Image (tube, grey):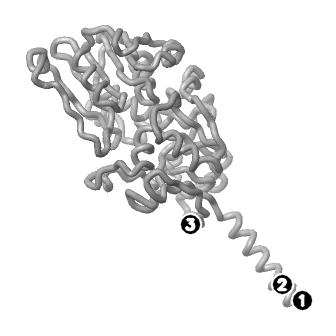
Amino acid sequence: MAEDAEVQSAEAQSAERRGAEAARAFWTVAPGAGEIRRETLREPGAGDVVVRALYSGISRGTEALVFSGRVPPTEYHRMRAPFQAGELPGPVKYGYASVGTVEQGPGEMIGRGIFALFPHQTRYVVPAADAHLLPAGVPPSRAVLAANLETAVNGVWDAEPQRTDRVTVIGAGAVGCLVAYVAARTVGCDVELVDTNPAREPIARALGVRFALSGEAASGATIVIHASGSPAGLERALELAAFEALILEMSWYGCQRVALPLGEAFHAQRLTIKSSQVGHVARPQRARYDRRGRMQVALSLLDDAALDVLITGESAFDELPGVMARLAGGPADSICHRIRY
């Protein structure tokens, strides 16, 4: 009887341990369809941390393309998220804006808030080097903006604005708003944020930049940063650019082809179109920062409560399959949608 009791106790402890190691994650299982699956966490090593998620953020740009199955096959490898599971087009566990608390790891990290480029999952194990400690004064609820803010920092570095530049940012989504914010805060140049949605005006005002509807935007910008995801927005960038201006393209179109009127004033104006992508640190700052250093710059900028205006919605984790379908389904007023765990 004593032996039976010991066996039952061991089995109960084993079951409890398995339950503690379990997690749930969001997977895209087919174009336009997602589900929450149970995960088994790997055994953490000496250099790992175990994280319990508090929040994650949805990128309506890249994640919408992944969820909708609109990533071209040529880009499957380059589009891999740092901790992606599965393969594009799916089933795939994709995402890169998770904020949580360290449950297990180096003593100085236990109980601390971190940001990780991890998909939507309740608990996970990552190398400690990939768990970025949140600076004092940055609440976890705001830190879901870190990935988009890192992209914005990289874009501003690519554009190399000076204080005397007139900068126009087209597209007041998460990346566009953050680009405008970074250019105004860190460089101090004149910035106009342009969008087709008049509801973006109070957001621009909260971020400390001017706002204009697309048809009313001022021409003569020395730098135009395009982040609307729309070919019409890029065409408008050509129209607003000054002589020998730089047009920085930050949108990613997936499978969509983009046509531009390059036979009009493009050559006479001696315009330059340059791409920006967060996969590499922008060349002008590559000697000073690696990717981890760039993330630290982004996290340090999150100390401003004005950025909370970009969190335009929040849902519970269990609602994520329906929320993702809604956000990817068409135009919406959402900028950054936060998932609560």
Task: Say whether marks 2 and 1 touch (CB < 8 Å).
Answer: yes
Q: Position of residue 110 (x, y in %)?
A: 66, 49
Task: Say whether marks 3 and 1 touch (CB < 8 Å).
Answer: no
Q: Residue at horizontal 51%, vertical 39%? A: 327
Mark 2 to mark 1: distance in Å? 6 Å
As drawn, which residue projects farthest toward the right?
1
Residue under label 2, please give it: 6
Left or right: residue 5 versus residue 155 is right
Does residue 106 show up? no
Left or right: residue 177 versus residue 232 is right
Going from the N terminus, do you reach mark 2 or mark 3 first?
2
The N terminus sits in image quarter: bottom right
Neighbours of disc 3 within 10 Å: few (<14), some (14-19), many (20+): few
Mark 3 to mark 1: distance in Å? 33 Å
Where 126 falls versus 339 (above or below)?
Answer: below
**Residue 142 lies in quadrant:** top right
Residue under label 3, please give it: 42
Question: What type is the residue that disc 1 sits on?
Answer: Ala
Where 122 falls versus 220 (above or below)?
Answer: below
Going from the N terminus, do you reach mark 3 or mark 1 first?
1
